[in-house]
Image (tube, grey):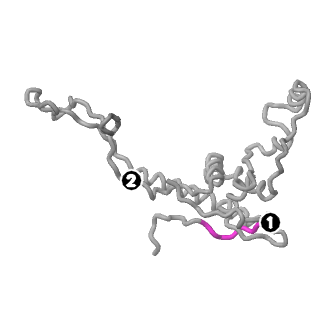
Amino acid sequence: MNMAHEFSVARVRPGRAGKTPVSIWDLLTWAFQVEKVQLDFDEMGSTAGERPGVSMEYILMKRGDLGCSVDGGGRSEPHPDADLVASALAALPEGCGGRRTAVWLADLARRGSWPDWGQGIRPRCEPVEWRNCKHGRYAVREVWRGPGRWPAPLLGKGDGYACRVVFEGGAREVAAARRAWLGWWSALLELQTTFRIRCDLTGFEVTADMPPMKPWQKPG
């Protein structure tokens, strides 16, 4: 379960006469959801028109094999501020999760949803396997041959069976979800600090607004 975050495309627009105040999360969502910007972990290679291990001579040879040059397909370039957002996210320090967290944040921003911090996790006991029959759905059982089994002569027709179960939704799962939330929050704080110090966005001014650091804690 994800915690949905309200986001209005019409509300987040880069300012023209002045800069539009925006939270770091709304800025990310605007860049990846509206401007369709992409992460590029080899930005220098992209600027030069090449990738590691592929020279310009190789690219020209391949274009010659096609007998034409490849255009961009007619898509307009993203807003410069969106490019800056993608560059800052691609350069996320390893202490904040590095590239793995950057890809995760970009995916969340495209979907416009916050990560799950465990609010939907409940302790439960589930059968290891389910089966369906004409009478409905039932848990798979098997003849129990382990400790505590009664002697065969004492077992009735339907006795001697056991259902293997698994326990889910325990403290370990909740703790993992909360650690992931804190990692996401810390990465957002790093990006927020970057743009509030550098102030190099042309249409936006990043505010101090942040999602709650620990939403599982009650106020006060």
Q: Position of residue 50 (x, y in %)?
A: 83, 37
Residue 204 magenta-drawn?
A: yes
> Which mark, residue 133?
none
- Horizontal placement of 159 versus 55: left or right? left
Q: Which residue is mark 2?
A: 171
Q: Residue at x 69, y 54 (%)?
A: 33
Mark in the foreground, 2 or 1: 1
Q: Residue at x 85, y 39 (%)?
A: 49
Residue type (three-letter) at the residue carrying disc 1 = Gly
Decide which of 86, 1 is in the foreground and name it.
1
Badge 2 crowding class, 10 Å Cα cut-off, few under 14, some 14 to 19, many 20 or more, is few
Residue 183 magenta-drawn?
A: no
Decide which of 193, 13 is in the foreground and name it.
13
Q: CA distance from mark 2 to mark 1?
A: 44 Å
Q: Which residue is mark 1?
A: 203
Q: Which residues are drawn in magenta?
A: 203-210
Residue type (three-letter) at the residue carrying disc 2 = Ala
Q: Position of residue 147 (x, y in %)?
A: 18, 33
Q: Position of residue 17 (x, y in %)?
A: 84, 72
